[in-house]
Image (cartoon, helix red, strand yellow):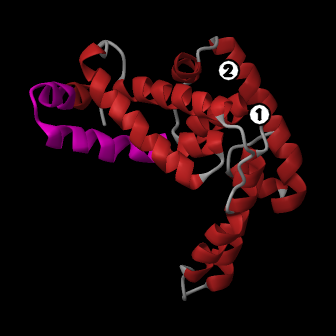
């Protein structure tokens, strides 16, 4: 959604058009869920948290500074809500990789199941490596590579300096490169953008 479109939808929501808010949710749900999942490492909790985030967004929309980008504001709410949830959690969460893997195997293409399986396995290996990173590093990698946000936008969301984001991004790439080079090969790592 472009910033100009965001402002139109925000105004429609403030004027009482709930359908306009449904459009905002539709457009931003994927990144809210992905960011929450990267931090919480649990699909059900991430989905619940995504709902909480959109409730907060809806209730606070009137206070949104329209000079800022709506996406950055939503990412910041997601990040803060996820970190608060993580900090208040008393039990250790695990990722339900086996169930997800079984589900993905059922959806393999009939045309070339070996290629599909290899791609799914590589994707899972990359995701597992990202999940091993420290909390802020996971978020930075997700926002930079998957959401293609700028370093400046990431700094605003996380609440750290641009230089600190650059350092964390560099170190995270090095960690991922080291972790992945033997598992999926140097060429595939470079294809995914994680250079040494």
Q: Answer whether residue 27 is magenta in the image.
A: yes
Is residue 196 toward the left or the right of residue 55 in the image? right
**Which residue is the site of mark 1?**
134
Image quarter in which the C terminus is found: top right
Point out the frontmost of discs 1 and 2: 1
Where, by quadrant of the figure, is residue 61 drawn? top left
Up/down of 119 relative to 23, above or below: below
Give the percent coordinates (x, y) of residue 86: 65, 34
Query: Going from the N terminus, do you reach mark 1 or mark 2 first?
Result: 1
Where, by quadrant of the figure, is residue 110 drawn? bottom right
Is residue 93 toward the left or the right of residue 159 in the image? right
**Which residue is the site of mark 2?**
165
Where, by quadrant of the figure, is residue 141 drawn? top right
Image quarter in which the N terminus is found: top left
Give the percent coordinates (x, y) of residue 176: 80, 43
135, 3: nearer the viewer: 135
Task: Kindly state the secondary structure of the residue where label 2 is placed.
Answer: helix
Q: Give the magenta part as a residue range.
A: 8-32
């Amino acid at each position: 959604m472009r910033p100009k479109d965001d402002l139109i939808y925000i105004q429609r929501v403030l004027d009482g058009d709930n359908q306009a808010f449904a459009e905002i949710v539709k457009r931003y749900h994927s990144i809210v869920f992905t960011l929450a999942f990267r931090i919480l490492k649990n699909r059900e909790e991430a989905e619940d948290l995504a709902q909480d985030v959109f409730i907060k967004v809806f209730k606070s929309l009137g206070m949104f500074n329209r000079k800022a980008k709506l996406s950055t504001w939503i990412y910041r709410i997601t990040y803060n809500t996820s970190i608060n949830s993580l900090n208040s959690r008393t039990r250790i969460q695990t990722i339900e990789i086996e169930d997800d893997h079984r589900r993905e195997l059922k959806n393999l293409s009939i045309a070339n199941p070996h290629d599909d399986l290899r791609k799914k396995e590589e994707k899972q290996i990359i995701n597992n490596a990202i999940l091993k990173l420290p909390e802020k590093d996971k978020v930075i990698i997700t926002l930079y590579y998957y959401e293609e946000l700028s370093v400046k936008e990431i700094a605003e969301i996380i609440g750290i300096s641009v230089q600190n984001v650059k350092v964390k991004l560099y170190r995270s790439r090095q960690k991922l490169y080291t972790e992945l080079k033997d598992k999926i090969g140097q060429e595939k790592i470079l294809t995914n953008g994680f250079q040494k």
